[in-house]
Image: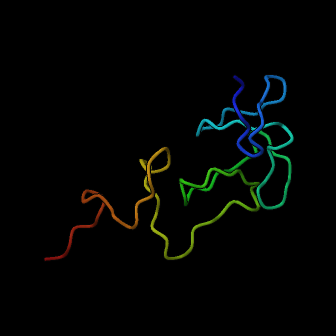
């Protein structure tokens, strides 16, 4: 069975597929576009949403979501295949309190 395209869910064939991406998803060449503006992307020009690991869509450089001023800094361990933390930081990364 052929693996489905992430965007249109139809089977991808060898001569018309892009990927697999870092998260394992595949796209047709025609479906590999920015989610916002529809600009065609390549494996070198696509961006993922680094703020929300559950968002598997692809974006161009101009439309990739940027963090807000009060969003926690994503941890390196959370960027791939792990749920987003809600502001909980490991104790070794926090500054020690002044006594």
Please name the residue shown 73% across and 47% down the image.
Answer: 46
Q: Is residue 3 left or right of residue 68?
A: right
Colour scheme in use: rainbow
Q: Position of residue 13 (x, y in %)?
A: 79, 25
Q: Is residue 84 left or right of residue 11?
A: left
Q: Quadrant of residue 93?
A: bottom left
- Does residue 62 sit above or below 27 in this rendering? below
Most distant residue in the front direction: 1
On the image, which quarter does residue 32 sit in? top right
Question: Quick check: 48 above or below 72?
Answer: above
Percent coordinates x, y for residue 56 in the rendering: 63, 50
- The answer to whether 14 is drawn above or below residue 39 in the figure is above
Q: Quadrant of the N terminus?
A: top right
Q: Residue at x 60, y 38 (%)?
A: 22
Observer-nearest of 20 and 45: 20
Left or right of 31 in this view: 6: left
Task: Identify the residue shown where x is 46% and y is 58%.
Answer: 74
In the image, 53 versus 70, the foreground residue is 53
Identified at 58% across, 40% down, the residue is 23
Whether residue 53 sits left or right of residue 19 in the image: it is left
**Furthest residue toward left:** 99
Total marks in image: 0
Residue 36 lies, in percent from the top left, at 78, 61
Residue 71 place in picture, x, y as percent:
49, 71
Where is the C terminus found, in terms of image quarters? Answer: bottom left
């Amino acid at each position: 069975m052929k693996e489905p395209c992430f965007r249109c869910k139809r089977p991808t064939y060898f001569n018309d597929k892009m990927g697999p991406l870092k998260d394992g998803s595949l796209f047709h060449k025609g479906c590999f576009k920015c989610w916002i503006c529809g600009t065609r992307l390549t494996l070198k020009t696509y961006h993922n949403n680094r703020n929300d690991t559950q968002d598997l869509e692809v974006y161009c450089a101009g439309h990739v979501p940027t963090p807000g001023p009060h969003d926690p800094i994503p941890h390196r361990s959370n960027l791939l295949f792990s749920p987003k933390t809600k502001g909980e930081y490991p104790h070794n990364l926090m500054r020690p309190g002044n006594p």
